[in-house]
Image: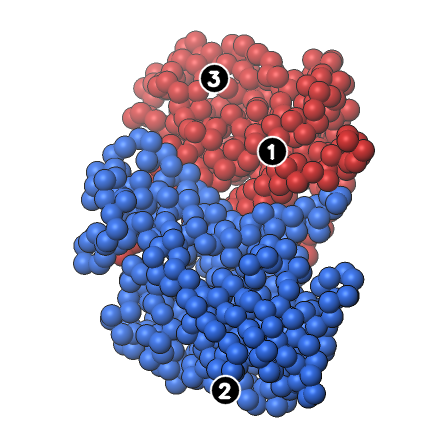
Chain colours: A blue, B red
Amino acid sequence: MSSPMPSGSSSHTSSHTSWDNTTLFVDDDPADRAFRAEVRDWVAQNLPAELCNRSRRIDPPELKPWHAKLYARGWIAPHWPKQYGGMGATLTQQIILFEEISRVGAPTPYPHGLNFIGPLIIEVGTPEQKAKHLPPILSGEATWCQGYSEAGAGSDLASLATRAEPDGDGFVVNGHKMWTTNGHFADWMFALVRTDPKAQPRHAGISMLLIDLKSPGITVRPIQTIKGDAEFAEEFFVDVRVPRENLLGALNDGWKVANRLLGSERFTTGHPRNAAVILNKARQVAELTGTLHDAGFRTKLAALEIDLMAFSAYYRHAAALHGENRAPFSMAPVIKIVGGELGQRASELLVEAAGGYGPLAGDMTIGNHAVNPAAELFEMRRVTVGSGAVEIQRNIIAKRVLGLPS
Amino acid sequence: MDLLLTEPQSLFAETATRLAADHGGPRRLRALRAGGAEIDAEAWRAAIAAEWLATVVAEGRGGQGLGLFDLALALEQAGRQLLMVPLLEAAAAAWALSQAEDGARAAAALADLLRGSGLIVPATEAASWRYGGGSSGIRYDHRAGVLEGSLAFVAYGETADAFLVAIEQGAQPMLAVVARTDIGVSTKRNVDGSTSSTLSFAAVHVPAERLIATGAEARRLTLRLQEFLTLGAAAELVGLAAAALAVTLDYVKLRQQFGRPIGSFQVLQHRAVDGFVDIELDRSLVYRVLAAWDAGEHHPAMVAAAKARAARSALQVTRAALQMHGAIGYTEEHDIGLYYKRAMVLAARYGGELGQAGRFSDLTLAREPVP
C-alpha cells in the first residue's frame, strides 16, 4: 500500500512529525526503489557542482554538457520508446528520474525538444522526420522552441495570424511569433501557422510546421522578462520558405496534433517539488531573519504546507491512475492550476520571509548557497500564465468536466 | 478522481453508496430535524445490518479486519447523503475496544455494539485536539477507582447506551465503558439537528477490573482513537462538500438570468471549479493518510492536515453554494442550507481548520529543514 514516507529516507525522516516534503507519498515498488538508488548515486557522481542550486535560470548552451551526460547514460528521454532511443520507462520511473535529478538542486533539461516536439514527431512524424530530428533532440545538439503564441493570440490561441501559403513544394511563412521560451537559443521551432484563412471553426485552418530558424527571412529578438533576464524572444517571419517535408501531420490538422500533448508531459513540470523547494527556502530564510517566530508567518506557512501535502497526495494518486490508463481528463488542468498557484504562493512567502532582504536585487546567502527571493517571485509569475493561463484551465474544467454551459 | 480500490473495496463502496442514498438525503434530514430526533434509527439499523462497523474490527475479535480506509468509503457516502447515524463514533469505539490487549474485558460491549443492541460512543478530552479549548476537566483516581469531572462536545449523547471514556492526559490515562445511567448527560442541539452533549461524572465508580486499558496502552489507544475520529470526520466532509457542489451545479445549469443559465457566467464557473479542485485534493489527501494510518504509521501532523483542509474546503464550498443559489439559498425551505449547517457541525467536530492547522504547525515546526 502507499506510504507517506519517502523511500530513500534519511535521518531526519525518522521522527513521526517530519518528512521530506519534496517526495511525499511515494509509491515505489522494490524495482523502483533500486532504480531511485541507482539514479541518486549516479547524479551525486556526475552532476557538475556549478549547476546546483542556482538562483537564476540557466540558458540552454550552459546546460549542454549536463544534457550530454544524461544522454550518454541513456536517461535523457525516459518517456520515449526504446526504438527511438528512449527508456520506455513507466511514469513512476520518469518521476523518479525527475525527483532525483532535481533533489540536489540540479536543473532538468528544457522540455521543448524532449517532452513536446519529440513525442509528437514519434507519434505523427514521417520516417524521414523521425530520422532527421529525433537523434539531435536526444543528443542535445539541436535546441527547440515552441512557436504558438503571438501578439494577438495568447489565451485565444486559435486566433493566430502567422500565415503559411502553399508555394511550389513548400510554404511561404509570414508573420510574428512571441513569448517563445529559448527562441534566441533555438535551432528549430515547431510552429502553429494558419494554412486556411477561411476555415471555420478557426482552429480547423491551422497546421504544424517544423521551421529551421537559420532560414533566410527570420529575425529573432530576445525579450527581457520582469526578472531582468532574456528567457524568451519574438521572431519575425518575412517570406520564409519552409519545405513541404517539414509539415508535421496532415495539412490543417495542426490543432489536433498540438492537442495530443496534454497528459503525461505535464507530470514533471507540474511536480509538487517545484513549490516544495521554494517553500523550504522560505523556511530557511525565515529562520535566518527571525520571521519564523512571527505568528502570522507560521499560519501562512502551515496553510501552504497543508496545501502542498494535499497536492502531493493528488499527484501520486494521479500518477498511479495514469499508470493504469485511468487518469481522468481533469488531471492535467488540475495539476497545472494547483502546481502553478502553489509555487506562486510559496514564492510570495519566500519574499515575506526575507523581510527587508525581500526586495534585494541581488542574491542573499543562506548557509552555503545563494537565494534570490525576488528572482524566485518573478519567475513564479510566469507559471500561472504560460502554456494556457490558469483561467483557461478553469474554463476547460468548467465546460468539459463540470458540464457548465457556454 | 477514482480511488484505486481493490475488488472487494469497490463492491463495498457500491453497496454503501446505494444504502446511503436509499436512507438519506435532505428530505429525510428535514423530517428528522422537525421531529427532534438525534439519530435516524432506521438508517442506523441498515448500517448495522450491512456490518459497516465490522470493517474496522479485527477478524479475531468478530470483525472483518479491513481498516479505516474501507470504513471511510461508507463515511464519505454518509456525508454525501447527510445521514444522521453515529457511524463514525460507533466505529471508533468498536475499533478501540477491539484493539485492547485484554480482549476479554471489552468483548461483551463490543459484541453488543456490533449487533446494534448497545450503542457506545467515545467521550474524550476535547482540549487535546483543540476542540473547544481549555484544560481537561476530568480525572481518574486509580486508587479509589473514581471518575470525577466532565467531558464536553460528545456526539450522539442522547441515544448512546454507554460511553467509551478515553483519557490520555495527566498521570493516569484510562479507557473504560461507562453506562449512561451512571452519569449526567446534558444535550444541546446543533444547527443541523444533530446534538452536542456534556457528560458529568460525579464520583462515578469505575473499579480497576472494569478498565479496558490503562497507562501507556490507554494513552496510545486514546490518541489513535482521536485520530480515528478526526480522519473519519474529514472523510464525511469530503462527501458532504461533493454533494453540495453537485446540488449547486444542477441549480446553476437551470437557473436563468439575463436570458441564459447563470452557470454560463465565468465568475460562477471558476468558483465552482475551485470547489471541485479542492475536493479532489482533499479526497486524495484523506485517503492517503487513511492508508498510512491503517498501515500503523503514526503521523499526527498529517491527520491534522487532512482535517484542517477538509474542514476549510467544505465550509468554502457550502458558502459558495449558498451564494450561487442567490436569495433562495438564504431560505429555510431550500436544501442547500442543510449542507452548510452540516458542514459547520462536521468542521468543528474533532477540531476545526484553525485548531488543526495550529496543531499541524506546532508538530511540524520542530522538524529539521530539508537539506
Q: Amino acid at mark 1?
A: Val
Looking at the picture, tell me which residue is in the foreground, A224 or B74.
A224
Give x and y (percent) for residue A299: 37, 34
Mark 2 or mark 3, whichever is nearer to me: 2
Mark 1 or mark 2, whichever is nearer to me: 2
Q: Which sits earlier in the primary sequence, circle 3 or circle 1?
A: 3
Q: Is residue A404 left or right of residue A324?
A: right
Q: Residue at x 74, y 30 (%)?
A: B24
Q: Quadrant of residue B304?
A: top left
Q: Which element type, helix, strand or loop, lies under badge 2?
A: helix
Looking at the picture, tell me which residue is in the foreground, B301 or B136.
B301
| Distance between mark 1 and mark 2 Cα atoms | 50 Å
Give x and y (percent) for residue A397: 65, 49
Mark 3 or mark 1, whichever is nearer to me: 1
Give x and y (percent) for residue A89: 52, 75
| Distance between mark 2 and mark 3 Cα atoms | 70 Å
Q: Chain for mark 3?
A: B
The answer to whether the residues at label 1 and label 2 have Cβ atoms under 8 Å apart is no
Q: Which residue is mark 1?
A: B317
Q: Which element type, helix, strand or loop, lies under badge 3?
A: strand
Q: Which residue is mark 3?
A: B152
Labelled disc at residue A135: 2
Q: Quadrant of residue A72?
A: bottom left
Q: Residue at x 45, y 47 (%)?
A: A342
Q: Residues within 10 Å of mark 3 (few under 14, many from 20)?
A: many
